[in-house]
Amino acid sequence: MSRILITGASSGIGEALTRSYQARGEQVIACGRSQAKLEQLTHLNGVSSLQFDITDREQVMATASQVGQLDTIILNAGDCEYIDDAINFDSQLFERVINVNLVSVAYCLEAWLPHLAPHGRLVFVSSSAQLLPFPRAQAYGASKAGLTYLANVMQIELARHDIAVSVVHPGFVATPLTDKNTFDMPFKITAEQAANYIIAGVDKGKSDINFPGLFIFILKFLRALPSACWRAIALRMQS
Ligand SMILES: NC(=O)c1ccc[n+]([C@@H]2O[C@H](COP(=O)([O-])OP(=O)(O)OC[C@H]3O[C@@H](n4cnc5c(N)ncnc54)[C@H](OP(=O)(O)O)[C@@H]3O)[C@@H](O)[C@H]2O)c1
């Protein structure tokens, strides 16, 4: 039985991860903002919760004394907001998204890395959106590109501390985050399927966990083409 801390556990992928790990007998510390949603998980055997706003460094640091020794940390909390009018750039929206998806992760690392056991694993949930520049995704894409870079450096830096690092790049997953999207979401999977991919990847010790495979293959293929090809496709997506 291992102790797993999951941020963003009150909804979507994080909730599915919490339920799957709990079902196989692990101890889960479920983190989120919504106390009501966390309470729906804490009645499950082995699930405890921590309620805080991840963008508030003081609140994150205050949890450090409560987490105990951890075997796995899954940094999954995040949000997506789109920039609809690039010429009237909304810097506050940009700041909000970067804070919740990237800066908050630094607070979590500062608070919890000292509590990660030797042979522990750190998991960053980034996004396949960081592979290409998608229309309106200036904030979300930049935050996830930054997060993947951070995760890749931590893979190098933490190796000598015997801590393994995984970075996850999901395609579209049906959750409250994507429910508000009005555009087509090809290859969309359920949160439970996403959790299964992540858990299987973590169990195998994979450093890169990308899914669904065909969607990621197509994005990587498009990225390998001259950048003008993707720009032509992206311009058509806008109209
Ligand atoms: N859904 C997709 O298609 C998709 C694709 C690629 C990557 N991802 C990534 O997967 C992760 C999970 O997304 P999801 O789709 O499962 O979204 P979701 O259902 O909206 O869940 C987001 C989670 O993050 C938590 N959270 C957000 N802001 C927070 C804050 N300020 N403080 C503390 N917790 C906060 C939420 O907590 P509360 O509800 O309690 O506020 C919630 O538990 C995100 O990092 C997202 O970028 C998702």
Image (cartoon, grey):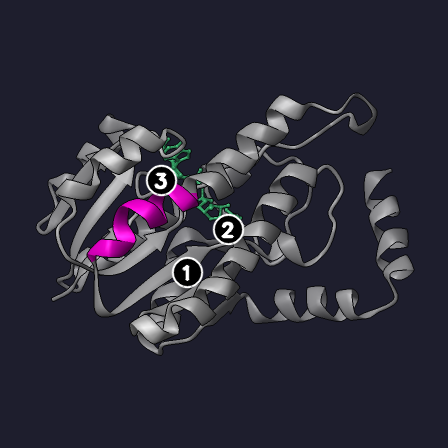
Near mark 1 (Cα within 10 A), the count class, few <14, some 14-19 or many ≥20, is some
Residue shown at 28% from the left, 55% from the top: 113
Q: Is residue 171 left or right of residue 58?
A: right
Residue shown at 61% from the left, 36% from the top: 181
Tell me the quarter of the picture where residue 132 sits: bottom right
Residue that extends furthest to the left in the rendered view of this protein: 45
Secondary structure, magenta segment, majority class: helix
User: x, y percentage for residue 124?
Assistant: 43, 56
Residue 11: image tag: 3
Near mark 2 (Cα within 10 A), the count class, few <14, some 14-19 or many ≥20, is many
**Which residues fall within the magenta stretch?**
105-115
Position above or below: 156 against 108: below
User: x, y percentage for residue 166?
Assistant: 42, 66
Sequence-wise, the earlier of marks 3 and 2 is 3
Q: What element carries label 3?
A: loop
Residue shown at 42% from the left, 39% from the top: 104
